[in-house]
Image (cartoon, rainbow, N blue to C red):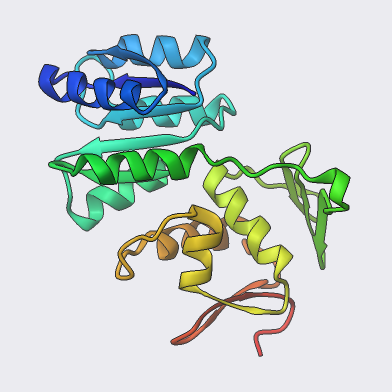
């Protein structure tokens, strides 16, 4: 897989790049946000590993710019900023994962592997490529979501989360199910990554419409017309 590492601290950049190469990936590494954004905008990568605090262009700006241009490349942010608000800001900017410095190499590689496991379109096995619940429609092939006549723009992880909920319509899905089914990685069970993405989905999907995403207190979430 082709990975771009954008990290201004030389030791960290070399450490991460070397580890990824030893894991079998083709790696390009740059030190500035401007160079990182230029490469990420013009070259096809399977994954971006970004420091958050970068010279010239910061990591969150890179992510927002890529998402605004409809890029769905997975993004892993590395940052010494580890407070809850910092992590939430990173996820809301459009990143798929957020790893706090200092980090263990084994965890970095595990998160990279999880992000590189892309879901396959299994048409040959009869898997539906278009899903519908009430007036909410999701097209997996075109990567489009609509609520009635309104088109909804979703970040890649939000799209995957909504797809999972729609595939389990009218069923209660637990936080563990969502972590394993959408993130494909065993996060700290206390993480609020699900809460952040569910909140974002509600703002986009249920805005000015009958609520479809419901919280089942103490258990998880449910997508359907009725709250009960």
With respect to residue 55, does 184 lie above or below? below
The residue under the point 38% across, 59% down is 193
Q: Residue at x 70, y 70 (%)?
A: 168
* Of residues 110 and 200, the one drawn nearer to the viewer in this rendering: 110
Image quadrant assignment for residue 30? top left
Number of marks drawn: 0
Q: Position of residue 201 (x, y in %)?
A: 56, 58
**Residue 115 x/y as whole percent:** 47, 41
Q: Is residue 145 visible?
A: yes
Which image quadrant is residue 5 in? Answer: top left
Residue 142 position within the rendered picture, expressed as x and y whole percent measured from the top left? 77, 36
Please name the residue shown 45% across and 25% down the image. 65
Where does residue 56 sit, x and y in percent of width and height?
23, 14
Identify which residue, 128 or 79, lies in the foreground: 128
Left/right placement of residue 190 relative to residue 75 reads left
Above or below, 87 against 93 in this view is below
**Residue at the extreme bottom:** 228
In which image quadrant can residue 191 be found?
A: bottom left
Q: Is residue 48 left or right of residue 130?
A: left
Quadrant position of the C terminus in the picture: bottom right
Does the image show residue 94?
no
Q: Name the residue located 17 percent from the left edge and 54 percent from the top edge.
A: 83
Left or right of 52? Residue 109 is right
Query: Is 207 rendered above or below residue 6?
Result: below
């Amino acid at each position: 897989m082709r990975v771009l590492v954008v990290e201004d601290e030389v030791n960290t950049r070399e450490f991460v790049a070397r580890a990824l190469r030893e894991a079998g990936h083709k790696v390009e590494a740059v030190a500035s946000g401007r160079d990182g954004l230029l490469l990420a905008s013009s070259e096809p990568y399977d994954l971006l590993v970004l420091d958050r605090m970068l010279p010239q262009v910061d990591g969150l700006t890179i992510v927002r710019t890529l998402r605004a241009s409809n890029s769905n490349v997975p993004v892993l942010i590395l940052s010494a900023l580890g407070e809850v608000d910092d992590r939430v800001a990173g996820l809301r900017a459009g990143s798929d994962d957020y790893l706090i410095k200092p980090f263990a190499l084994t965890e970095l590689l595990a998160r990279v592997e999880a992000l590189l496991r892309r879901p396959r379109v299994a048409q040959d096995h009869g898997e539906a490529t278009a899903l519908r619940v009430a007036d909410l429609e999701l097209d997996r092939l075109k990567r489009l979501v609509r609520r009635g006549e309104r088109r909804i723009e979703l970040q890649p992880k939000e799209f995957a989360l909504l797809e999972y909920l729609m595939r389990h319509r009218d069923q209660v899905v637990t936080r563990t199910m969502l972590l394993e089914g959408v993130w494909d990685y065993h996060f700290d069970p206390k993480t609020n990554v699900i809460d952040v993405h569910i909140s974002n989905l509600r703002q986009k999907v249920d805005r000015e419409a009958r609520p479809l995403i419901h919280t089942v207190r103490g258990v998880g979430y449910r997508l359907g017309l009725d709250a009960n």
